[in-house]
Image: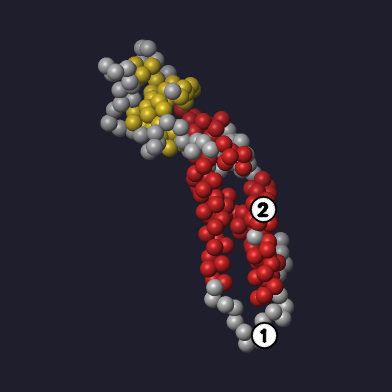
Amino acid sequence: MPSTFQGLAVILVALLPGALVIFSLERVAGRAAIGVGDRFLRFIGVSAFLYTLLAPVTYLIWHDYFRSGALGPDEKLPLWLWPIAVAYVLVPLALGYGVGRAIRGGRRWARVLTPDPPTAWDAVFGGRPRGWVLMRLKSGRWIGGLYHDHSYAGGYPEPADLFLEVEALVDQDTEDFALDANGAPIGMDRGLLVRWDEVEYLEFQ
């Protein structure tokens, strides 16, 4: 742990961009890090990447305004440095949000920049797929419904619950969806919330 305020400030400045990127990304795409140590290394890695890209700019700002003797005792920092400080926070947040949206959209380049999902559940639902979900509960009852834009699947490390925005009628004898005249599952005017620890079998169509 840092023993001085300056040491703490250096650590915060060094880790903040990476932490903001990861925080923003996980808000959109779900958490993929496993353990505190893994997340800490990601903060450092992303921060190092951003600082490398911005090294010429940060060097010039340091040289002109922050190095010892750069400003006289009566000189003030220019006002235009304030938008730079705002960008220091907003740019990492925007970068994380953009990568998170790309992951949700299934963009291949975004997957290259991110690790594999920590669980099979996150691998299936992390990309926001659309389709019909059929499940057999541990009680033996069959249920299902539509997973679409307004549905939600809990991600690691939270409980793997599942909300389907439209519950579908399931025939308990055939163990499949009841179909209408057009061969589509019959939706009901309600949603469905299920906890994973209640599910024995799940099929995504």
Taking 133 as reference, is 66 left or right?
A: right
Labels 2 and 1: the sequence-earlier one: 2
Image location of residue 85, percent across then percent down: 56, 67
Residue drawn at the location 67% of the way across and 69% of the way down: 60
Q: How was the colour assigned to the protein in this rendering?
A: secondary structure
Q: Quadrant of the C terminus?
A: top left
Gap in angstroms between the C-alphas marked 2 and 1: 33 Å
Q: Amino acid at mark 1?
A: Gly
Name which residue lies at 65% across and 48% down.
42
Residue at image x 46%, y 24%? Answer: 204
Placement of the N terminus among the 4 image quadrants: bottom right
Question: Which of these two is toward me, 75 or 23?
Answer: 75
Task: Identify the residue at image location x=54%, y=57%.
Answer: 91
Judged from the image, the secondary structure of the residue bearing numbered disc 1 is: loop
Q: Which amino acid, by three-letter code, is at mark 2?
A: Phe
10 Å crowding of disc 2: few (<14), some (14-19), many (20+): few
Picture quarter containing residue 163? top left
Residue 119 visible in the shown view: yes
- Residue reaching furthest bottom? 74
Q: Residues within 10 Å of mark 1 (few under 14, many from 20)?
A: few
Judging by the rendered image, the residue that carries numbered circle 2 is: 49
Say if 134 sits above or below 24 in the image. Answer: above
Location of residue 202 in the rendering, given as x and y in whole percent from the top left corner: 47, 23
What's the mark number on residue 72?
Answer: 1
Residue 98 screen position, x and y as percent: 51, 48
Residue 43 visible to an observer of this rendering: no
SS type, badge 2: helix
Kindly indicate whether the residue at mark 1 contacts the one at mark 2 (C-beta within 8 angstroms): no
